[in-house]
Image: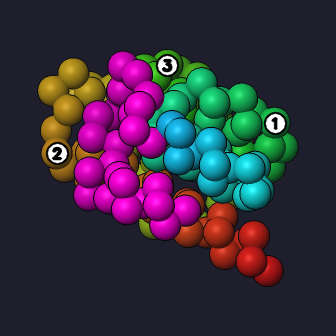
């Protein structure tokens, strides 16, 4: 994973709330990294490189709150806000994600995604990092 995170530093990752296409530079590295990780970690990695389709394929097969959370983030990033809200309701009580109001964040992204405000991009990165680190910690146990 180090090569991926060196190639796309965290503060340069996921620069758009709703990306139009995957980050080409990261896709090849993500293919290498996702071969040996849990589905939850892989779903997060694909979001990190803005490959919503691959993240979706994985997250929808994870039948627990973590999968629902990745699924909700993915739908929000593809501008399917109603579907994102549905999956947010499915992830209620996720232990890693009690620190913020995800439904309010969804509404703010829906309202402001066209202007891509830096404040929301930073919040998206923090959301991703929190859930990703939780997934990595679960994998280590």
Looking at the rendering, the stretch of residues picked out in magenta corresponds to 1-26
- Mark 1: few/some/many CA within 10 Å (<14, 14-19, 20+): few
User: What is the C-alpha distance between the residues marked 1 and 2?
Assistant: 32 Å
In the image: residue 15, left or right of residue 72: left
- Measured in 3D between alpha carbons, the distance from the residue under mark 2 to the one under mark 3, in whole angstroms, is 21 Å
Q: Give the mark nearer the N terminus: 1 vs 3.
A: 1
Q: Position of residue 114 (x, y in %)?
A: 21, 21
Pick whichever of labels 1 and 2 is earlier in the sequence. 1
Location of mark 2 (residue): 118
Please identify, in this view, whether the residue under mark 1 or under mark 3 is nearer the observer.
1
Give the camera-side residue of 40 and 109: 40
For numbered disc 1, what is the local secondary structure?
Answer: loop
Asked if residue 69 can be seen in this view, the reply is no
For label 2, count other residues whose C-alpha is less than 10 Å away and answer few (under 14), some (14-19) or many (20+).
Answer: few
Q: Secondary structure at mark 2?
A: helix
Q: Are marks 1 and 2 in contact (CB under 8 Å)?
A: no
């Amino acid at each position: 994973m180090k090569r991926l995170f060196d190639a796309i530093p965290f503060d340069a990752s996921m620069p758009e709330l709703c990306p139009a296409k995957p980050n080409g530079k990261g896709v090849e590295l993500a293919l290498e990294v996702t071969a040996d990780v849990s589905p939850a970690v892989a779903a997060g990695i694909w979001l990190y490189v803005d490959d919503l389709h691959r993240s979706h394929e994985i997250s929808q097969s994870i039948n627990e709150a973590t999968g629902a959370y990745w699924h909700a983030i993915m739908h929000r990033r593809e501008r399917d806000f109603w579907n994102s809200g549905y999956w947010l309701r499915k992830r209620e009580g996720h232990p890693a994600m009690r620190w913020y109001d995800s439904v309010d964040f969804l509404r703010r992204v829906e309202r402001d995604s066209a202007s891509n405000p830096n404040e929301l991009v930073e919040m998206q990165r923090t959301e991703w990092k929190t859930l990703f680190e939780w997934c990595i910690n679960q994998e280590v146990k």
